[in-house]
Image (cartoon, grey):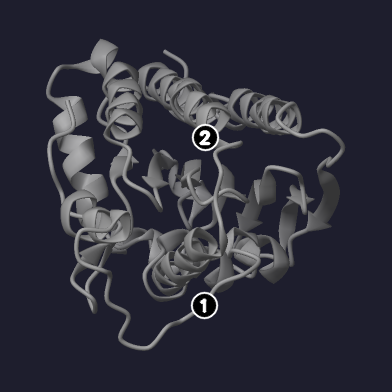
Amino acid sequence: MASVQKIDYITPIKTYLCNLQQDFCAHFEAEEKEARFLKDAWRHSEQGGGLTCILKEGLHIEKAGVNFSHVVGSHLPQSATENRPYLAGNPFEALGISSVIHPRNPHVPTTHFNVRFFISYPKDADKGDDPVWWFGGGFDLTPYYPYEEDCRHWHQQAFEACAPFGKELYPRLKKACDNYFYLKHRKEARGIGGLFFDDLNHWPFETCFAFLQSVSKHFVLGYLPIFQKRKSHPFGEKEKAFQHYRRGRYVEFNLLYDRGTLFGLQSGGRTESILMSLPPEVSFDYNWTPIPGSSEEKLVTEFLKPREWL
């Protein structure tokens, strides 16, 4: 029987993720008239690197980022070993795609997508210990205006991404997403959730990889129809101001809690690429309260609380 150490985990995942990045860029460029992604290759401080693709000032997309990274390091950062402290300091490789779309129209939600693969190698290669690998990722939706049919569509696609892998998976990963994208200091959710998974390696490698691909496919199926339906919806200064206010919550979460941000900074990643998820315009209004009976109040009081959408 061949040793696990001789299995090439990296090549199929890297090939898939690079193709996925191209597909995502093509999907979002198709929603624009002229705006195109700027492609910026970079090298990691130790070994590896990535390709950051940024689209700015589009007709319908204010800012979009699709970032691929393949980082090779000598010491696995603490942010990646929360559930496996015994791996801290091991040599590692990490591959992933991270994408954030900040639409111009406030009736279109912001969305975030991420999938990643980690492999940790033994410190002493001569001992013959097997590497430890795992997958993580997910997607979530941050609406600014409350459209129940959009939220149901989003969660239907999340359900279908999980369905071939077990009926218990969607409710478990939905709950994990609700718990993760939560601003503890404000006691409020960032958005209406989706899927979140980490430390996935309890299935065979091929099954875990297939699940990552299913999540990637259903992200597009979930978001693009919403984007296309809402991108030309009329809006004014009031709606834009509320979008900027809610984007402030997005910034707070990414800078205070997001594990991907912490891992990127702790592993010596490229700061410009790590922070590409931040919106281009944002406001922090002091002690803002919604007008009673308004759509803004409905979003805050009914949509930004964990609930069953299906």
Q: In the displayed structure, does residue 85 sit left or right of residue 134?
A: left
CB-based contact (under 8 Å), mark 1 and mark 2: no
Residue 95 in view in this figure: no
Residue, x 75% and y 50% (percent of image)? 54
Work out whether 283 lies above or below 291: below
Q: Quadrant of the C terminus?
A: top left
Judge by depth and name the residue closer to the eye, 60 or 168.
60
Residue 2 in view in this figure: yes
Q: Amino acid at mark 1?
A: Ser
Q: Which mark is residue 230?
A: 2
Residue 160 locus on image (x, y percent): 30, 16
Residue 202 locus on image (x, y percent): 25, 30
Look at the numbered disc 2 and give the secondary structure of its residue.
helix
Q: In the displayed structure, does residue 121 sit left or right of residue 295?
A: right
Report which residue position mark 1 lands on. 283
Residue 308 locus on image (x, y percent): 13, 35
Q: Which mark is residue 101?
A: none
Mark 1 vs mark 2: in front: 2
Q: Quadrant of residue 206?
A: top left
Residue, x 54% and y 33% (percent of image)? 227
Q: Quadrant of the N terminus?
A: top left
Mark 1–mark 2 Cα distance, whole angstroms, equals 23 Å
- Counting every numbered tag in the picture gives 2
Q: Residues within 10 Å of mark 2 (few under 14, many from 20)?
A: some
**Chain-order first, disc 1 or disc 2:** 2
Residue, x 21% and y 46% (percent of image)? 176
Look at the numbered disc 1 and give the secondary structure of its residue.
loop
Residue 217 locus on image (x, y percent): 49, 20
Q: Amino acid at mark 2?
A: Arg
